[in-house]
Image (cartoon, rainbow, N blue to C red):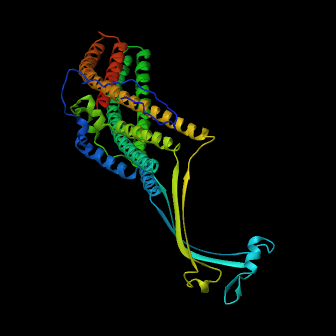
């Protein structure tokens, strides 16, 4: 991206500033695959029927999105208003009034000795009635008004891209919360099964204690572990309630149960990600397109500010009927009123305000360029990080699965050894604790993958 200096006439100050030209890499890695998953619609990306219903509802009822839609309408109307600024203004009006000139003034003396018609003097005080259209138009010689309209249109387009970015973020937030909810349901189910296993182990320890094979310490340790996991049940239940209500908020409804199918969570497989090429970010990322539109609008704002140094040419004209008595309106041509004026106004002295406005417009343009560069850089880094994250999570999930299998097997071994007095009760407890933690970690990894 480069900001090129513009040559200004002697009427305007010269402000030139350049930014370093930066190019995005040709690809994310050695792959040259030009297909990109961002070109797909969300309906084809998310196939879970419950999730699709939630997203559909959110796109209709989410309050933040509806507020943004009204902002788009405001931006669109701003463009329409700017369009009217460089078109002629045609008004039609009527007026009535009364005026008394001082007798010992030039106009008062003339009025007192003037006959209008057949010896009729001008009445005192003098009424005045007028009716007719008038037109005013500012010649847009320097394209200030047209550039202002185009700048408003570009900001309207930027607002529309902001809406698209918000929709993307909304869909992502709902999907994240939905998969988090499935993961919590799965963790809750695993915890209940683990408590059942620990209850069985506790019963065995109590029997061994009655047989004087273990002490009361072993019973207390197992009871404490069971109580700890039973307490964890309520913690996960609270997380489920909060996650459900977060989804309800995004969907724009009051708290209620969220329909879902948690039984299939462990078997879900993440979609294959087609990364595409970095230049496709410019086509697919609405935040980049928004920054681009804002940069183009800022460029036009500089031209608008520069035009303030040049003369403005305005034309005013009108045609109508005027008389001190409405009955005389149609006594033409005496009652006909018409006028035409032209104004050429240019700033000469004390242009500090104009210079400051122009300098600020330049600074905002340079600022928009840096914002555009930052948006592209941020988007590129986000994609690179997530592509690496996807691969690393896949590898991590495979090893965690092996860890869970090994610890599940070790639970049976430690229990058998403990019953035959070949293992200490702490080995059983630690094995069960490690197995539960590993299952939770596996579910957490699966959630991050999804």
Whole-percent x, y for residue 240 in the image: 40, 38
| In front of the other: 106 or 125 | 106
**Farthest-out residue, right:** 104
> Which residue is depicted at the point 57% across and 85% down?
331
Whole-percent x, y for residue 412 in the image: 25, 19
Figure quadrant of residue 18: top left
Residue 67 position (above or below residue 341):
above
Whole-percent x, y for residue 61 in the image: 39, 52
> Which residue is depicted at the point 53% across and 62% down?
316
Q: Is residue 206 visible?
A: yes
**Farthest-out residue, bottom:** 118
| In front of the other: 302 or 334 | 334
Is residue 75 rendered to the left or right of residue 285? Answer: right
The N terminus sits in image quarter: top left
Q: Is residue 240 visible?
A: no
The C terminus sits in image quarter: top left
Is residue 417 rendered to the left or right of residue 425? Answer: left
Whole-percent x, y for residue 258 in the image: 36, 46
Residue 332 position (above or below residue 167):
below
Is residue 8 rendered to the left or right of residue 290? Answer: right
| In front of the other: 138 or 185 | 138
> Which residue is depicted at the point 29% across and 37% down?
284
Figure quadrant of residue 386: top left
Residue 54 position (above or below residue 403):
below
**Farthest-out residue, top:** 422
All told, the count of numbered labels is: 0
Is residue 319 rendered to the left or right of residue 70? Answer: right
| In front of the other: 83 or 194 | 83
């Amino acid at each position: 991206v480069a900001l090129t200096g513009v040559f200004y006439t002697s009427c305007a100050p010269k402000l030139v500033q350049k930014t370093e030209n930066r190019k995005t890499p040709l690809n994310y890695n050695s792959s040259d695959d030009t297909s990109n998953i961002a070109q797909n619609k969300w309906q084809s990306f998310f196939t879970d029927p419950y999730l699709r219903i939630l997203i559909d509802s959110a796109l209709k009822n989410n309050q933040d999105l509806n507020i943004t839609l009204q902002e788009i309408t405001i931006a669109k109307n701003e463009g329409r208003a700017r369009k009217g600024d460089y078109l002629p203004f045609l008004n039609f009006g009527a007026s009535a009034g009364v005026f008394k000139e001082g007798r010992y003034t030039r106009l008062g003396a003339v009025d007192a000795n003037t006959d209008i018609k057949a010896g009729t003097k001008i009445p005192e005080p003098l009424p005045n009635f007028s009716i007719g259209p008038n037109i005013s138009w500012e010649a847009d010689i320097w394209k200030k008004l047209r550039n202002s309209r185009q700048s408003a249109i570009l900001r309207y387009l930027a607002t529309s891209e902001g809406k698209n970015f918000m929709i993307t973020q909304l869909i992502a937030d709902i999907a994240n919360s939905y998969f988090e909810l499935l993961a919590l349901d799965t963790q809750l189910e695993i915890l209940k099964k683990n408590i059942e296993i620990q209850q069985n182990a506790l019963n065995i320890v109590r029997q061994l204690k009655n047989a004087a094979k273990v002490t009361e310490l072993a019973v207390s340790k197992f009871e404490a572990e069971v109580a700890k996991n039973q307490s964890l049940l309520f913690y996960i239940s609270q997380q489920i309630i909060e996650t459900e209500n977060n989804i309800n908020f995004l969907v724009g409804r009051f708290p209620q149960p969220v329909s879902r199918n948690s039984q299939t969570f462990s078997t879900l497989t993440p979609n294959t990600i087609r990364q595409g090429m970095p230049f496709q970010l410019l086509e697919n990322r609405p935040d980049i397109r928004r920054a681009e539109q804002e940069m183009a609008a800022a460029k036009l704002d500089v031209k608008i500010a520069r035009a303030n140094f040049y003369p403005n040419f305005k034309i005013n004209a009108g045609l109508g009927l005027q008389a001190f008595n409405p009955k005389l309106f149609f006594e033409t041509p005496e009652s006909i009123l018409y006028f035409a004026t032209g104004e050429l106004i240019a700033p000469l002295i004390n242009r500090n305000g104009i210079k400051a406005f122009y300098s600020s417009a330049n600074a905002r343009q340079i600022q928009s360029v840096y914002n555009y560069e930052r948006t592209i850089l941020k988007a590129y880094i986000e994609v690179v990080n997530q592509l690496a994250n996807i691969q690393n999570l896949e590898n991590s999930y495979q090893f965690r699965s092996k860890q869970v299998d090994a610890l599940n097997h070790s639970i049976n071994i430690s229990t058998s050894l403990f019953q035959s007095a070949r293992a200490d009760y702490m080995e059983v407890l630690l094995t069960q604790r490690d197995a539960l933690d590993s299952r939770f970690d596996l579910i957490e990894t699966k959630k991050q993958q999804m």
